[in-house]
Amino acid sequence: MLLSSFDYHRPTSLDELFDLIGLIKSQNESFSLYGGGTDLIANLKLSGESPDNLISCSRIEGLAGVRHDPNNNSLFIGAMTRLADLCEDRQVIKKCPVIALTAKKIASPQIRFLATLGGNLLVNTRCVYFNQTELKRDSLGSCLKTGGGSCRLVKSADTCKARFVSDLAPVLILLGAKLHLKSADEERTLMLEEFYRPDGIQKNHLTLGEILSFIEIPLDQPPKILYEKLRVRDAVDFASLGVGVGWNGKKMSAALETILIGTDPAPVVARFYLKDFKDIKEMIEHASNQASALLSPLKQDFFPVGYRKKMARQLVEKMARELTGKP
Ligand SMILES: Cc1cc2nc3c(=O)[nH]c(=O)nc-3n(C[C@H](O)[C@H](O)[C@H](O)COP(=O)(O)OP(=O)(O)OC[C@H]3O[C@@H](n4cnc5c(N)ncnc54)[C@H](O)[C@@H]3O)c2cc1C
């Protein structure tokens, strides 16, 4: 699984990055950005193909680290902040401890030492047919993601059914995180919740040549959040099912929110308002049933489809009870 040859670049500023991208585009060459490379390099090795240029963002000034902005009471986390640093960061632990706790559930210490927050939010979708060596893929036959005409998991599907696996996405969506995206001629912000697409190939709304620079997290009245992960081993493994639950107990607009990953091509988001139910117990029962009903797991994981649906129901119920204090 060797990489084919490519030119390697390490710009030190955003201006340098965008000049470089402009030059590469003008030469009709391909490129990929990378943070820690823990997902990208593995995928390139499996595919047996490399872009003409790999651009590391690790030396770009100002893209790593955590800053609290007292003016709008928000936390700004640089996309190049390593997961290992997120786990230890004092401001993160104090203001949004669930981020540090969730980052600790990703991969292994060695991987977290290289992996970045930005790379995690942009991690590739996974599938039992796609995440294989080129040799094995060839023997199995092509799929939509490898340029074939049909999805091997769901023959009738017209979009890729590879599953979304970023563990930090559910937690950051629950926190109301906003992405700061920058290209040579535009700077824009987008709610993380609106960023993903239900398609394993066109995964999100990032455009070619655009970089994720910061993640902004509002700190005024954040909901209480828990995140749990179903996986075979308690380390290294990707989520077979990831469950994020948020509870905002404000009197008039109390709401429970559930975000599920690891089964579908994008996070599965649902919101339940207490005013629509007789009491909290009824709301939790409805939310847990919905968690199971809304998921579309496919036969591409160690855990059977029915088991993952059942676990979605049970985890949401357990976590919602814990958050609302209604055992
Ligand atoms: C053994 C193993 C276990 C893993 N377990 C987990 C797990 O449990 N949970 C999980 O969520 N992930 C897991 N991962 C995947 C991966 O390690 C993490 O998601 C990691 O956070 C990716 O970050 P990175 O910086 O290495 O991303 P990279 O590999 O550098 O990049 C990933 C993608 O993001 C793009 N990108 C990166 N940064 C930027 C940016 N600033 N702007 C625009 N595009 C950008 C790249 O072009 C690429 O497409 C695992 C990986 C391995 C190898």
Image: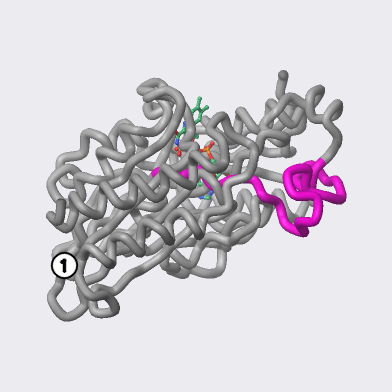
Residue at point 64%, 39% (across, down): 299
- Residue beneath the point at 25% across and 54% down: 320
- Along the line of sight, which residue is nearer the eye, 131 or 115? 131
Relative to residue 272, is residue 10 drawn left or right?
Answer: right
Which region is colored magenta? 143-167
Q: Is residue 162 left or right of residue 261?
A: right
Q: Position of residue 8 (x, y in %)?
A: 63, 32
* Residue displayed at 15% across by 51% down: 327
User: In this figure, which residue is indicated by the disc labeled 1?
Assistant: 249
Disc 1 residue crowd, few under 14, some 14–19, many 20+, Cα 10 Å:
some
Residue 7 vs 57, above or below: the answer is above
Q: Is residue 171 left or right of residue 269?
A: left
Q: Quadrant of residue 125?
A: top right
Query: Can residue 12 be seen?
Result: no
Residue 85 visible within the image:
yes
Give the colour scheme shown. one colour
Residue 119 on the magenta segment: no
Along the horizontal axis of the image, is 4 left or right of 288? Answer: right
Q: Nearer the viewer, residue 86 or 253?
A: 253
The quarter in which the N terminus is drawn is top right
Q: Residue shown at 24%/53% (left/top)?
A: 225
Say what amino acid the circle numbered 1 marks: Gly
Determine which quarter of the picture holds residue 93: top left
Q: Position of residue 291 (x, y in %)?
A: 43, 56
- Mark 1 residue element: loop
Residue 317: percent from the left, percent from the top?
30, 51
Task: Name the main secondary structure of what is drawn in magenta.
Answer: loop
Above or below, comparing residue 212 to residue 229 in the picture: below
Q: Position of residue 301 (x, y in %)?
A: 58, 34
State the count of labels.
Answer: 1
30 and 91: which is toward the camera:
91
